[in-house]
Structure formats: structure tokens, C-alpha cells
Amino acid sequence: MFTVTERAAQVLYQFLQSEGKTEYALRIIAQEGGCSCCGPAYGLFLEKESAPGDTIIHAGPVKIFLDQMSSALLDEATLDFMEGPEQGFFIDNPKAQSQGGCSQGCC
């Protein structure tokens, strides 16, 4: 099951409040990457309504929408937030096949 850390949920809610969009949810799209060494590629978007077949995850005051393919790719993943010079949301996905050493520079 996809999980959201308490910190990520708090930061997302604060962002939604600051934008006046507390009725929105975060949609996460996961797609198989173009390079086998990097694992899935992710996209994050704000949406008001879920789509048919979506998995809806409630994390404190926020919701996350996942389509069926993304839900499968993110089954054991966690959304978190990192503070510091490179702050932002990140997805920790143990299913991602990161083998390192990608010589084509696709990562």
C-alpha cells in the first residue's frame, strides 16, 4: 500500500492552504521509465476530482489520487518531504529497479 509520511501530508496541506486550494488532491502518476536502470518516472499534479478506478489515499487533511497503473507501481512506496538545500517531495519506492552505473546517462 502506498503511504504518505506525516511530514509530507503537513507540507502538502500548508501548500494547498497558501494557494487557496484545500479542496484539491495530489495526483501522482508513475510510468515505467525509458531506462531500465532508473525505475519509474513520476509526475505530481493538483486535481479537484478523482477519475473512475482511482485509488484514493487519505493522509491527514489531504488526499492522493492514483490511477490503476500508478497504484501498482507505487504499491510499496512512500511519499515524503525532505528539507534543506534540495528540499521537496520525493518518492521512496523499494520496487524501483535502480541498478546504478547507467552508462547511457538516461537517469
Image (tube, rainbow, N blue to C red):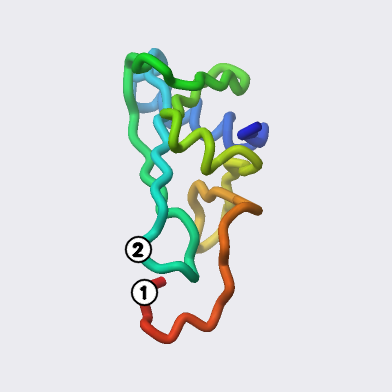
Q: In this view of the protein, which residue sits in the foreground, 3 or 15?
A: 3
73 on left or right of 93 = left
Which element is circle 2 on? loop
Query: Neighbour class for label 1 at 10 Å: few (<14), some, many (≥20)?
Result: few
The mark nearer the N terminus, 2 or 1, is: 2
Q: In this view of the protein, which residue sits in the foreground, 82 or 104?
A: 104
Which element is circle 1 on? loop
Q: Hey, what amino acid is under mark 1? A: Cys
58 on left or right of 51 = right
The picture places residue 33, in percent across and down from the top left corner, at 39, 59
The picture places residue 95, in percent across and down from the top left corner, at 61, 52
Q: Which quadrant of the rendered structure holds the C terminus?
A: bottom left
Q: Residue furthest bottom?
A: 103
The picture places residue 98, in percent across and down from the top left corner, at 57, 67
Are the residues at dot 2 and dot 1 in contact (C-beta closer than 8 Å)? yes
Q: Which mark is residue 29?
A: none
Classify residue 48 by image quadrant.
top left
Which residue matches tag 2? 34
Which residue matches tag 1? 106
Taking the spot 61% from the left edge, 51% from the top edge, the residue there is 92
For the residues carrying marks 2 and 1, which lies nearer the camera in this image? 2
The picture places residue 44, in percent across and down from the top left corner, at 38, 40
Taking the spot 56% from the left edge, 77% from the top edge, the residue there is 100
Q: Hey, what amino acid is under mark 2? A: Gly
Q: Is residue 61 depicted above or below 78 in this figure?
A: above
Q: In this view of the protein, which residue sits in the foreground, 103 or 26?
A: 103
Q: CA distance from mark 2 to mark 1?
A: 8 Å
Classify residue 21 by image quadrant.
top left
Q: Is residue 27 depicted above or below 56 in this figure?
A: below
Q: In this view of the protein, which residue sits in the foreground, 25 or 88?
A: 25
